[in-house]
Image (cartoon, coloured by chain):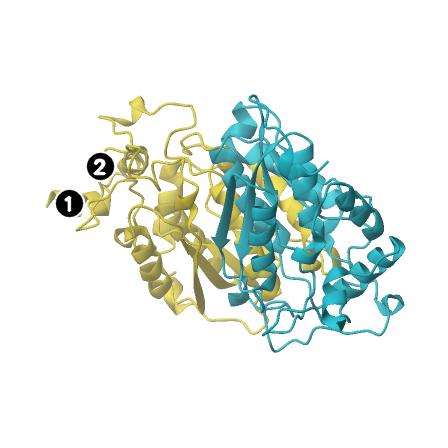
Chain colours: A yellow, B cyan
Amino acid sequence: MNLQNRPVPKDQKSAVVLLSGGLDSATVLAMARQAGYQVHAISFRYGQRHTVELDRALQQAKLQCLNQHLVVDIDLAQFGGSALTSCSIAVPKHNCDAEIGNSIPVTYVPARNTVFLSLALAYAETIAAHDIFIGVNALDYSGYPDCRPEYIEAFERMANLATKIGVEGGLIKIHTPLISLTKAEIIARGLELGVDYSATSSCYDPDPVTGQPCGRCDACLLRQRGFQQNAMSDPCLATVRK
Amino acid sequence: MNLQNRPVPKDQKSAVVLLSGGLDSATVLAMARQAGYQVHAISFRYGQRHTVELDRALQQAKLQCLNQHLVVDIDLAQFGGSALTSCSIAVPKHNCDAEIGNSIPVTYVPARNTVFLSLALAYAETIAAHDIFIGVNALDYSGYPDCRPEYIEAFERMANLATKIGVEGGLIKIHTPLISLTKAEIIARGLELGVDYSATSSCYDPDPVTGQPCGRCDACLLRQRGFQQNAMSDPCLATVRK
């Protein structure tokens, strides 16, 4: 079913969805809408080296006909410590996905998901939403500690103690519908829901002018394998190679 | 002992201290320094209706000779929902502290301590600090859910799962040295350590021009009682009444 044509029920519950503009969050957005939520998306201008992912977040919000999309400025680059926010740390490149390591990579941004989820929590509380969706997954996750199920459970527990809606208004739930899916399964689910993956960006080091993916960073390789397992090529990489 | 004259040991551990410019955080700053930490303070320009507390944070950083003081911009006013960030919600005023209620007041800012602690965590991780200090207390705390010990414990647990330093480098500790102290005990401790309380601001609704406290909001009344119990008047209020 194409999400753009889905009827909106009157008693719809609100949810906040973290929308980076990447493949995962675009899929989660579609899943939250398909589950019947009125979606309020939140994206972050956090000092990332490239803004193409934010452009794609805006595109996805438009393509999926969102009611609300908030872009929050929070400069994580001032803390440093990541290849995604500092030009002095190079993004690792590989020839194939088998070369991707298991340790926490230099593309890890200190406490990023915690900062993002905290701001999503503030947003949720002010719109009386008890549901927050985030596109973390524990399989193809590149070794980030803040993508693991035990982290999400701990955040959810903390959120219920932290807030007025948690204390007075019932359970706050952090939804992670991708947590146990492979990249291939995520893509398959998104394709079923009509997600336009050509309007997403996952690359850690895209071309600064064209925004096109490098094709050789961890994120590009994991994504590429996911599309291959769905017997197709990455629509973003396909564009590059034309 | 006056903190300004304290010698700095060579093997000093670093800590991040949340510094609002209020009475509590000024005291915590002095306590963290007295405990031997090299303090990196973090303050927030978060869309608060008045900036006097931020001015006081800068003053405290100077008075207590800090090595590092980071002021982070994060606009929580865009979410709304609090008398501290929205002019459309009035700050409650009382004639005496006995009138202060027990329920969560309109001065509660949705998820504020969670957002602030998350950013402090990002800062701590990039400077390899395992210690974060925050001036919450569970007695004279005005009913905020994110000032309770169970909340802090849940945040600490989450922080250790969220971060590279938590996973690889040992325990992250959220220190709350004021958690079980009354306002009077906090002030007594601060006075021992030489804290200059005339250079602090706790008022929820200070004069927009002079920055002087209203004397009748929850924060003013709790603070006033604390000074009275130390047989002195609030140095900020005393200035107003001159």
Q: Quadrant of residue A196?
A: bottom left
Which structural element holds mark 1?
helix
Please give the label number shown on residue B191: none
* Residue plotted at (70% across, 47% down): B195
x and y percent of residue A67 in the render? 45, 69
Please give the label number shown on residue A240: 1
Which chain's residue wears label 2?
A
Which structural element holds mark 2?
loop
In screen coordinates, is B37 left or right of A42?
right
In screen coordinates, is A217 left or right of A42?
left
Mark 2 residue type:
Gly
Mark 2 lies on residue: A215
Q: Nearer the viewer, residue B27 or B113?
A: B27
Q: Is residue B11 above or below residue A42?
A: above
Whether residues under marks 2 and 1 lie with C-beta atoms below 8 angstroms apart, the answer is yes
Q: CA distance from mark 2 to mark 1?
A: 9 Å
Mark 1 residue type:
Val
